[in-house]
Image (tube, rainbow, N blue to C red):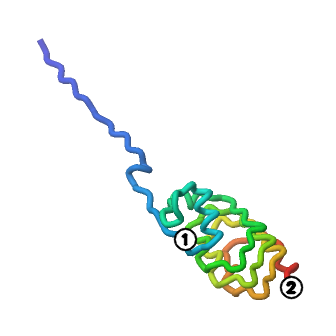
Amino acid sequence: MKKFWTMTMVFMIVNISSAFPDTLTNICHRGLIGLKIKQITEAESCKRVSTQKMAQIKKLSLEFEEISTISHDAFQGLTALEQINLASNYIETIPANTFRGLVSLSQLDLSYNFISEISRSALGLSHKVRIKGVVVNP
């Protein structure tokens, strides 16, 4: 009688999201923009926001939020961001590198603000972006 050996192969299914733990970041210094990001990502605190969830945000609506300043890194980590609406705020300047790294950005609404200065490198994007409202400002 011949013996047949049975070989059992074990396959491990690994959930990729658990294999690479999420990084948490502090976005408290981003002001109202940080609070909006916290809300969208459903974080418990602005000190512990998921960078993976931030990278999935596609639209950020911040109109009528009484925003007067934007930090240079306000949108850092929002790599999938396609639309930003900053209309009807009190923004006067757009600092250098504000929109750096936003490779998916296609629409930016800055209408009805008080913009008097935009740094040359603030809008230094490598692709076309439809910008609304800059000419309406005083």
Quadrant location of the N terminus? top left
**Residue 51 showing in the rendered view:** no
Please give the count of numbered marks on the rendered protein. Answer: 2
Looking at the rendered structure, the kind of residue marked 2 is: Pro
Q: Dot 2: within a 10 Å radius of its alpha carbon, few (fewer than 14), some, or many (20 or more) residues?
A: few
Quadrant location of the C terminus? bottom right
Q: Is residue 3 left or right of residue 119?
A: left
**86 above or below 20?**
below
Residue farthest to the left, as pictured: 1
Q: Position of residue 15 (x, y in %)?
A: 41, 45
Query: Could you say which quadrant of the image residue 97 lies in?
Result: bottom right
Query: Could you say which quadrant of the image residue 84 lies in?
Result: bottom right
Badge 1 marks a residue whose secondary structure is: helix
Q: Is residue 14 left or right of residue 71?
A: left
* Residue drawn at the location 22% of the way across and 28% of the way down: 7
* Residue that carries the numbered disc 1 in the rendered image: 28
**130 above or below 117?**
above
Badge 2 marks a residue whose secondary structure is: loop
- Decide which of 116, 67 is in the foreground and name it: 67
* Residue drawn at the location 70% of the way across and 87% of the way down: 120
- Decide which of 28, 94 is in the foreground and name it: 28
Q: Position of residue 106 (x, y in %)?
A: 73, 66
Looking at the rendered structure, the kind of residue marked 1 is: Cys
Query: Could you say which quadrant of the image residue 80 lies in?
Result: bottom right
- Sequence-wise, which precedes: disc 1 or disc 2? 1
Q: Position of residue 88 (x, y in %)?
A: 81, 71
* Residue that carries the numbered disc 2 in the rendered image: 138
Q: Position of residue 79 (x, y in %)?
A: 59, 65
**Residue 93 showing in the rendered view:** yes
Residue farthest to the top, as pictured: 1
* Residue drawn at the location 81% of the way across and 77% of the way down: 113
